């Protein structure tokens, strides 16, 4: 099974469609979207068994769409796809989903940059100061005993003005962050002695410029890599950590090289922590070389049924044409033939056609005795399938919070549906463990729940393994 996930919602900003040229008014766009979903979404029949709520919603939206502007139309289209509560199903324009708070407003403050810099030069407050991150220079000012405000000093984007409030930090370690469309994203922040502030749910790392932290640039870069990058590190004589922040296709070589470079270190670690916090998924290919270290001889995989549509056939043909001319296409050709023979029906590409298939794994001769996998609400899609596999191993424990919950319908593609500028992101298969074991909007549950009182998850995991 290969599962494709494009960033979920963690780094996606809604883009306005005001400037796009389209011949479709809102009523036409909605009509075409409804037809696309009703005929090609693998979960449609199951999720509309109770016809009245669905028909009531569609009739209401159709009525609203007859006389509305572009901004209101975004909300109408989003309300339709939101009905299905599928993280792999959304509608948008220019490759980005419409936001639930499209057209939000921003707060701003008045400030004098020289006066502000002079005041924070000698501050002992770890948060107050001037910070920078990609595309922004941010001032952080304490505004009350429980709150700090992060405001724009300089921004590459013309959508942000000097003084606009980009985020708020609260005393309990939480934050509220304004995305490009002014919708708000909440999460938790961490502050490090190297002068780095990390906002977890949006994946933003800021580096302090004023006052300068008492560390070298090299130390800062090493810490940044540790926070947001791929790395292997020995934490103690017994325990090591492997950080994998993404399974997306562009990181396949980096993950493979990291595992290859540290194979001996992994084998000789008594305990291994695999940190998947914030991993949005990507492809199951990303972790195949990790399985011999964590699994027994067999893995029970859940099968998938693909809905045979011309759209999916076209996507497979496009993928086939993108391959190197010397690459084998036998498997794809068989899949395309099977889809063509069963248009409108569900097909299983495995030889057995059963809902469960057994995968044989050749364990390495030497591997860690105990493994902890860290996961949080931002761990999604194929990263969740890794959790599903890992839980089958007797030596693995999941620590953290329930994962994102986006695994029942997958292998999603971004496709047009007949109105220029609009696309729908839609899955092509449904998992054959349904309806017995749903995961969407529930998540994979941890073996050990990490509550909000735990500030350092890695330290917590080390104690769990060693004490």
Image: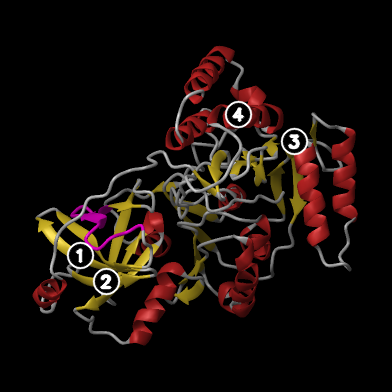
Closest to the camera, between mark 3 and mark 2, is 2
Q: CA distance from mark 3 to mark 2?
A: 52 Å
Name of the residue lying farthest toward the top: 52
Label 4 neighbour load within 10 Å: few <14, some 14-19, many 20+: some
Q: CA distance from mark 4 to mark 3?
A: 39 Å
Q: Secondary structure at mark 1?
A: strand
Give me the disc on residue 140. Answer: 1
- Classify 34 as above or below 127: above
- Classify 19 as above or below 200: above
Nearest to N terminus: mark 1 or mark 3: 1
Q: Which residue is mark 2?
A: 131
Q: Secondary structure at mark 2?
A: strand
Q: CA distance from mark 2 to mark 1?
A: 7 Å
Nearest to N terminus: mark 2 or mark 1: 2
Left-right relation of 15 to 214: right
> Given contact means CB atoms under 8 Å apart, are the residues at marks 2 and 4 in contact?
no
Nearest to N terminus: mark 1 or mark 4: 4
Q: Which residue is mark 3?
A: 355
Give me the disc on residue 28. Answer: 4
Closest to the camera, between mark 1 and mark 3, is 1
The stretch in magenta equals 159-175
> Which one is in front, 351 or 108?
108
Q: CA distance from mark 1 to mark 3?
A: 53 Å
Label 2 neighbour load within 10 Å: few <14, some 14-19, many 20+: many
Q: Quadrant of residue 169?
A: bottom left
Label 3 neighbour load within 10 Å: few <14, some 14-19, many 20+: some
Queried whether the magenta region covers residue 171, the answer comes back as yes
Q: Position of residue 291 (x, y in %)?
A: 65, 60
Label 1 neighbour load within 10 Å: few <14, some 14-19, many 20+: many
């Amino acid at each position: 099974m290969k599962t494709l996930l494009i960033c979920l919602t963690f780094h996606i900003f809604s883009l306005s469609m005001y400037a796009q040229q389209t011949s479709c008014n809102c009523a036409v766009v909605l009509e075409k979207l409804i037809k696309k979903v009703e005929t090609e979404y693998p979960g449609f029949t199951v999720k509309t068994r109770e016809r009245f709520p669905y028909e009531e919603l569609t009739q209401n939206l159709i009525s609203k769409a007859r006389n509305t502007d572009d901004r209101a139309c975004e909300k109408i289209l989003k309300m339709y796809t939101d009905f299905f509560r599928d993280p792999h199903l959304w509608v948008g324009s220019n490759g980005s989903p419409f936001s639930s708070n499209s057209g939000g407003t921003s707060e701003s403050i008045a400030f004098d940059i020289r006066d502000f810099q002079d005041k924070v030069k000698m501050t002992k407050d770890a948060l107050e100061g001037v910070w920078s991150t990609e595309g922004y220079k941010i001032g952080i000012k304490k505004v009350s005993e429980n709150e700090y405000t992060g405001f724009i000093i300089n921004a590459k984007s013309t959508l942000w003005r000097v003084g606009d409030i980009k985020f708020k930090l609260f005393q309990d370690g939480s934050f509220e962050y304004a995305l490009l469309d002014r919708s708000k994203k909440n999460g938790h922040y961490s502050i490090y002695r190297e002068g780095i502030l990390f906002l977890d749910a949006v994946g933003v790392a800021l580096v302090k410029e004023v006052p300068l932290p008492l560390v070298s640039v090299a130390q800062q870069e090493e810490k940044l890599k540790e926070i947001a990058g791929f790395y292997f590190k020995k934490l103690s004589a017994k325990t090591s950590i492997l950080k994998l922040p993404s399974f997306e296709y562009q990181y396949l070589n980096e993950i493979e090289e990291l595992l290859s470079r540290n194979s001996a270190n992994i084998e000789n670690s008594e305990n291994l922590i695999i940190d998947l916090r914030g991993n949005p998924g990507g492809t199951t290919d990303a972790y195949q070389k990790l399985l011999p270290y964590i699994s027994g001889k067999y893995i029970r995989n859940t099968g998938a049924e693909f809905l045979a549509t011309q759209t999916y056939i076209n996507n497979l043909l496009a993928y086939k044409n993108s391959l190197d001319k010397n690459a084998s296409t036998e498997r794809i050709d068989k899949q395309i033939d099977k889809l063509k023979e069963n248009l409108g029906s569900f097909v299983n590409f495995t030889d057995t056609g059963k809902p469960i298939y057994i995968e044989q794994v050749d364990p390495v001769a030497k591997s860690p005795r105990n493994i902890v996998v860290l996961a949080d609400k931002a761990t999604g899609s194929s990263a969740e399938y890794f959790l599903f596999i890992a839980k089958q191993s007797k030596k693995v424990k999941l620590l953290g919070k329930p994962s994102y919950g986006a695994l029942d319908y997958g292998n999603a593609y971004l496709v047009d549906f007949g109105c220029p500028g609009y696309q729908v992101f839609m899955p092509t298969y449904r998992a054959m463990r349904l309806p017995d074991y749903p995961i969407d909007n529930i998540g994979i549950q941890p073996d050990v729940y990490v509550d909000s009182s735990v500030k350092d998850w890695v330290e917590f995991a080390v104690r769990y393994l060693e004490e």
